[in-house]
Image (spheres, helix red, strand yellow):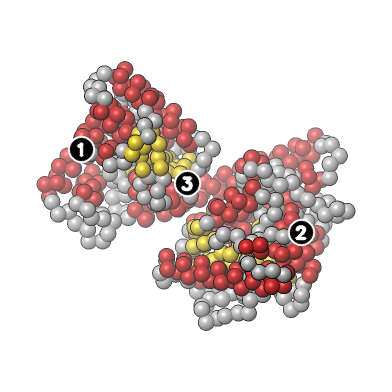
Amino acid sequence: MIVAIDGPAGSGKSTVARALAAREGFVYLDTGAMYRAVTLKVLKAQVPVAETAQVAKLAQEAVIEFVPGVPGEAPQVMLDGKDVTAAIRTAQIDQNVSAVASVPAVRQAMVAQQRAVAKNIDIVAEGRDMGTVVFPDAQVKVFLSADAAARAWRRTIEREGGNAAQPGAQVKDQALYESVLKDIQSRDAQDEANAASPLHPAADATLLDSTRMTPQQVVDAIANLVALAQARQAATASDNAAAAQSSVAEKGAPSQPASSQAAPAASGPDASKAKATGAKAPKTKPGQAPMKPFHNTFDDYYDHGMREFPLPARCVFNVAAGLIYGFSRLYWPWDYEGGQQLIDELKERELGTVMVMNHVSMVEPVITVVMFWRQGLRIRPVFKQEFNKNDLMRWVFSRVGGIPVDRGTADLKAVRRCQRALKRGESILIYPEGTRIRDDDGKAPIHGGFALIAQMAKTDVTPSAVIGVRDVTPEGAHIPRPHRVHFKVGAPLKFGALGVKGRKAQLEAMEAKAMDKVFELRAQLRRDYPGEW
Ligand code: DC
């Protein structure tokens, strides 16, 4: 996914693009810094800017790299192996960069580098011509503007060491403000007159005027556009997967079991990515009959891999997951710290993991399921058998890969189903508290079955935590409210690293350690987001 953010100097592009990239886990590309780096090279070589052939040669030779630092903050800029982060932000560079950036051959060289960087990755690219020239097919295009006076006001406060986003922030030096305003107005004029790439919004860009918006509001607005684009992409991928599936069927595929035809083409939005990272072929239990297109029993759904579900069920799941994904990103803007690392690991290995989490509302399993789905993976929530008393819930839970457990007994059937799913490469999502806990006093006995499931499947347990969900459905409210939700995922815990011997001792150690870790992660989240539950 490419997010292209264009706009004039001081519109807040950099702050917003960096924050957005950190929030979405995308790479951040500051193309202005690239033109600044070339300008530095030109000035150092003492080549007059009017000598366009020499300037172009220097641009072609320039090796510009970004070293990411703390997410949300500016990366280090390297020119020909040297750190030039500070050197490209001087008044001398400000005065010369527009002229260098208007040399067509310089632009050509930079555009080629920018496209190369963006190949096959999710990126937030910020500049003047991202949506119009460099990435005309970007899925999200934003043109960010603000009054020249507002931009000058922000820049002046920044130069004075303040934070323009803080309420009550004020300019101290009026003369500095006047000179910054003049500078911004003259750069606007130069950027607009840049014959090689004049500054203007792409026809399909969303125009955002940030004059009266805080950076957070701008980031939220663009994140909403990203969520919509992701949902659109997911729906298209699932349509394509379904079309590929039916074309295989029409051509009369060789006499394979139906289950193996299903993979990995119909495996959700990231089918091609999953393929590249070695998505696993579904494994039907030896002697187990493949599912029929219709009229399967609930047990069939619990016993088969989700990729072996019949095509109609998979289509329904993909469309619903796409819609819920988009909806959840808009309504419950969520971040999944550490989630990408886990996903990347799972894509590389055969076995799924047993994810355990604190339980506050129904929102967290829904988000977790669609978060995995979005990445071409599957996670199957274990739910209490009692939900099956409601026919609609029973139907829905079976189609989303849920596995029922009878908590009153040692439900070995459920344990075996989870074990087989893990061996197929599906993960299992378990809430060991068994019931929703909405405050620290509402302690529940921990159901330790998750450790047994992981031990039987010879896999690990991944602790995770969620906060922010209690306010989605506060006490007494029945309709979920929009609220920000935060997840944090720990490193998978391996039995071998627990430091105890014997199956039983290992089980007990895993139960205790995994839950300690869940509550530790929750405590960390609460420290990071005070006041959230
Ligand atoms: O965003 P900035 O102030 O760091 O940009 C520095 C200069 O580079 C600015 O004068 C415009 C130019 N620029 C450009 O021409 N094309 C881009 N994609 C990005 C920046």
Task: Give the structural element (helix, strand or loop) at label 3.
Answer: loop
**Residue occupying image coordinates x 21% and y 49%:** 159
Which residue is drawn at the image coordinates 27% and 59% (left, top)?
Answer: 166
Q: Is mark 3 within 8 Å of ligand 1?
A: no
Give the mark nearer the N terminus: 1 vs 2. Answer: 1
x and y percentages locating residue 429 in the rendered image: 65, 63
C-beta proximity under 8 Å, tags 3 and 1? no
Residue type at mark 3?
A: Phe
Query: Any mark on residue 245, and which?
Result: none
Disc with the residue nearer the chain's start (3 vs 1): 3
Residue named by callout 1: 91
Ligand 1: does it lie within 8 Å of the C-beta at label 1? Answer: no
Identify which residue, 57 or 505, lies in the foreground.
Answer: 505
- Residue 232 visible in this rendered orientation of the protein: yes
The residue pinned by badge 2 equals 420
Residue 339, compared with residue 514, is above or below; it is above
**Residue tagged 3:** 26
Distance from disc 3 to disc 1, alpha carbons, whole Å, reads 31 Å
**SS under mark 1:** helix
Q: How many marks?
A: 3
The kind of secondary structure element at disc 2 is helix
Looking at this rendering, what residue extends furthest in the right direction? 287
How far across and down, in percent of the image, does residue 305 sit? 75, 54
Counting other residues with Cα less than 10 Å from the Cα at mark 2, is it few (<14), some (14-19), or many (20 or more)?
many
Q: Earlier in the sequence, mark 2 or mark 3?
A: 3
**Residue at the image point whose x is 79% and y is 47% from the top:** 259
